[in-house]
Structures are given as structure tokens and as C-alpha cells.
Amino acid sequence: MKTLKTSLPLLNAMVVFEAAARHGGLTLAAQELNIAQSAVSRHVANLERQLSVELFTRRGNRVAVTGAGNTLAEAIREGLGTIRQAVEDLTAHDSDTFMVGCSHDFAQAWLMPRFGLITSQVADGRVLLQTSTDYRDFDQPEVALSIRFGEAGQWPEFVTEKLLDGEWFPVCAPAFLARYPALASEDPEAFMAVPLLHQVTPPGAIDSWQSWIGT
């Protein structure tokens, strides 16, 4: 008799595929899950091989979810959503839990050294930390407080308080500066003549080259 373990694909592969299908690509899924894009591609390929079904069509660097992929992604969402709801129902009695959300890098570099301050304010309760690169994860009702990168106007439905200022400056290897010495002048136009590394950011993000250099 087949068990759930032998009849279903690995849970990790299904979670990774669902994220890729939801985002319509591998890059944003990798960012959400804090893993390399190659790992996302490997999980999806293994899942396709195990099921003998094409879940994504590939044209060059672009991918698109197939009809079979959409069917599987919806089933995974529904199944894992049922499990999550059951877990939430079972733990709903724990009203003394205080959940804080922020990005993984911010948690490591800034929040963890100050974590004792937070726990000291939650008497007879426990503090949970949720890290994610997708701020929509922090919109869930169980998240009591979240630390986000941006400006207050981006989240008008929340009560916000400025935590700290940000400072942006370009960095490069010494050899790169030697190839493009005009960068040392700090003239914004000098940056238009060199290759720039871009993050995946929403339009108008304050940590983009467009915002830093100007249009």
C-alpha cells in the first residue's frame, strides 16, 4: 500500500514550485524563499521529472506556467492552506504570542542584538520572529509588528513610526574604479556610462539606481 510519503512529491519541491507558479517566474520565487534561483530551477525540474508533466514552458530566459502547472499549484495552495488554517486554529488560544516580521538580513544585522528589549516587554508570553522578503507576509493578522524598508506613505492602512534613516552610496571593486575613474568625481552622469547591477525593486523604490541618479 502506498503511503503519503511514497505517493506524493517532496514537500520542499511543491512549496518551491507553488511560489514560482504564483510569481510567474523563478527569480521572485527565489527571493521569497531566500534560496538561489538555481535551486528553484532544480526543484521544478525534479518535480517535472517525477510527475512526467511539463509545469513550465521555457523560451530562452523566460518561463510560463502551463495548464497542468496551474492545476497543481492551485491544489498545493488549497492543501497547504487547509493545513495552515488547522495549525492556526489549534494555536489560536495562545493570545500571549507577539510576532515580529522583518527581512532576514535586517533581523541578523539589527534586530537580533536588540531582541532582548522586545522580549522584556512581553510579560509571560513568547515572541516569534518571522522573516520574509515579501512584505505581504506581514499583513497577516497574527503579525503584531513589522519592520519594513521604505516610506510611511507606502502603507497608509497601518500606523507607522520611522525607525531610522537610510544612506545610499555606490560601491565597486578597485579594479572597476580603475577602469572607470570618472566615477570618483561623484558626477551622476558618470554612472550612465558603466554597467550597473540592479535589484528587483518596484517602480519608484528609493533604493534603485533611478532614484539615486535621477531620470
Image (cartoon, grey):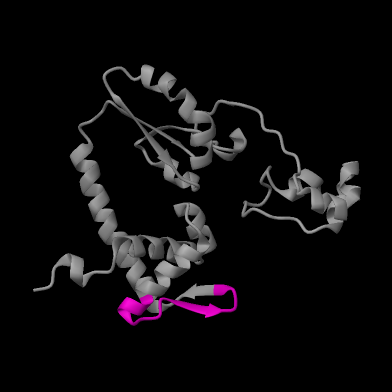
Q: Residue at image x 29%, y 66%?
A: 75
Q: Is residue 197 left or right of residue 159?
A: right
Q: Position of residue 205 (x, y in %)?
A: 66, 46
Judge by depth and name the residue closer to the eye, 123 or 10: 10
Image-quadrant location for residue 142: top left
Judge by depth and name the residue closer to the eye, 54 or 183: 183
Q: Is residue 10 left or right of residue 120?
A: left
Count all numbered tags in the image, as a single digit: 0
Q: Which residues are magenta?
A: 48-62
Q: Residue furthest left?
A: 1
Q: Residue at image x 28%, y 60%?
A: 78
Q: Position of residue 65 (x, y in %)?
A: 45, 73
Image-quadrant location for residue 91: top left
Q: Residue furthest front?
A: 175
- Work out whether 44 lies above or below 187: below
Q: Residue furthest bottom?
A: 52
Q: Residue at image x 59%, y 73%?
A: 61
- Work out whether 126 lies above or below 42: above
Q: Is residue 189 visible?
A: no
Image-quadrant location for residue 166: top right
Q: Is residue 49 magenta?
A: yes
- Work out whether 185 lies above or below 113: below
Q: Residue at image x 36%, y 67%?
A: 73
- Work out whether 180 lies above or below 137: below
- The quadrant in which the N terminus is found is bottom left
Q: Is residue 51 magenta?
A: yes
Q: Position of residue 187 (x, y in %)?
A: 89, 44
Q: Is residue 35 visible?
A: yes
Q: Position of residue 141 (x, y in %)?
A: 36, 38
Judge by depth and name the residue closer to the eye, 142 or 108: 108
